[in-house]
Amino acid sequence: METNKREVVSRRDLLGVIGGAASAALTGCAPEAGQTASPEAIGSTTDKLVAGSTVDSLFGFALVQEIRFPISTAAIQASGTFIPAGGIVTSARLDIVTPYSAGAAVQVGQSATASQLMSASDSNPQVAGLYVVDQDTPWGPPAAVVVSVTGAPGEGAGFCIVSYIISGPQIQRDTGSPDAATLEAGASETPNAINKPYATWRGGINLPSGYGVTLMQGGTVELPSLEYPLTIQPRDPAKAPFQLRLASTQFNSTNDDVLYYGYNADAANPTEPVCRFGIEQDYEPSPGVHWLECYIETTQFGSNPGVPTYRPIGFVLDRLTGGLSMALQYTTFLNILGGPIGGPATQQIKIQDGMTTLVPSNYVLRALDGLSFENLAGDISIESPYGNLTLASGHDKVMSMIADAIEITTGGVAQAIFDTNVSAARFYPNIDDTGSVGISGQAWSTIFTHAINVSTPPSPTATSGANGAPPAQVAGYMAITVNGTEYMVPLYNP
């Protein structure tokens, strides 16, 4: 920071001050009779000379803006508006109207550097007057002007006045200013014609037909500069600004230019979240791999802007192959909404870890040419706890179930098992295969047209009778239970 020695000027001589350059040094002048430290409009240009066209020749068409707010005996006092990123402070002034108690000292700066603009030695708050420090101080990230008062004074009041500029092209019309309809004297209707500069702007911007605004990033190709082409600070100074930010970071051998737009985009306010839309024009994650990335990212707080907490949605375009990939990220759940034209949009699908919920009734998952469900590890379960479950295939089509065993349960208890064993299939009523009915590997029709094959008869083979007569005794019996009554079916030798 470059400063000159402090100068004390009576408020009667304020018209002799242009942009903080005092025309006289009248140490110890008292305030005018009847003056009190009443608030003035925050963010407005109050210096008539600064507000006039004289500013154009003094600052090379750089708009001089002013932050002015009343000060009291409070230890920390912040301005109602921020100096935006890219601002350069040209003057800091303390207008002491009511002298402060003995032992009090006043500094002007920002929360990180209390004396950035005026140190305690730059003013004597025990003597009324205007204390001025001309300077050329880059401000840094957007921040409020902070006045620090030490010594716990019992009385004292005045104003803090900080003038700053932001170099760059001017806007032709400000329809929100009181003089929007009147150009400055001598100005013509050209893109360079400007209105009187007002620090508080609430109107629209009118540009002549065919006129565009083109901005160029500063620095060099090897080392581009960080730029803030647009910063909009909400009226509440505790809130972070909305910003348009252009940065450049080198990954491997490539400078990746990144454009951010959003809330607290530079994460300068550590107590507020970051929410920004980003475009990285050439990210080189590994040598020779080049991506264009586009995403929305957010962090819970702005203290670590380089490591985003979440990127809820984004895509990557491979600049060399043209391949496109997209990603969704969530921590609690993902809502997919839908609805008729005109709304309202209602929840259709809700995805949480381990669960996908289909919300509307009679929801249909339909594939036009083949549908496959796969689970690469673990179990897969299809349930219908409150209704029937129907598995159906088309006419003359096959429903194929590939498994070693099929288990039928009721209330979580196995009631029947159908399994395959080498070349045979068998069915039995529970997980114990005793009492099972075996079916050989022959065609199912043989059950009815030929025989039921029992692998081991329950008793030894009997001796056949002579000349084909029945044997003297049966080979054994097979028990069949029908409606709770057991019947014995005799088995004869062939």
Image: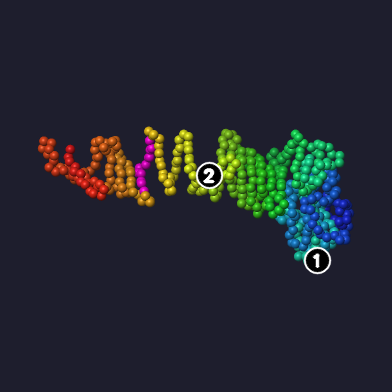
Q: Is residue 2 visible?
A: no
Circle nearer the viewer, 1 or 2 = 2
Write down the quadrant of residue 439 in the picture: top left
Spot occupied by residue 212 in the image (x, y as percentages of width and height): 74, 36
Report how many numbered discs are placed on residues in the image: 2
Spot occupied by residue 494 in the image (x, y as percentages of width and height): 17, 38
Q: Is residue 129 visible?
A: yes
Distance from Cα at disc 1 to Cα at disc 2: 70 Å
Q: Which residues are magenta?
A: 398-409
Q: Nearer the viewer, residue 82 or 391?
A: 391
Above or below, comparing residue 397 to residue 12 in the picture: above
Residue bearing the label numbered 1: 102
Of pointers 1 and 2, the one earlier in the residue sequence: 1
User: What residue is drawn where x is 81% and y is 58%?
Assistant: 38
Relative placement, left or right, of 105 versus 440 is right
**Residue type indicated by callout 1:** Ala
User: What residue is drawn where x is 38% and y is 40%?
Assistant: 401
Spot occupied by residue 154 in the image (x, y as percentages of width and height): 78, 66
User: What residue is drawn where x is 54% and y is 46%?
Assistant: 347
Q: Which mark is residue 444?
A: none
Q: Classify mark 1: helix, strand or loop.
A: loop
Write down the quadrant of residue 167 in the picture: top right
Relative placement, left or right, of 215 versus 332 is right
Q: Which mark is residue 348?
A: 2
User: What residue is drawn where x is 77% and y is 41%?
Assistant: 171
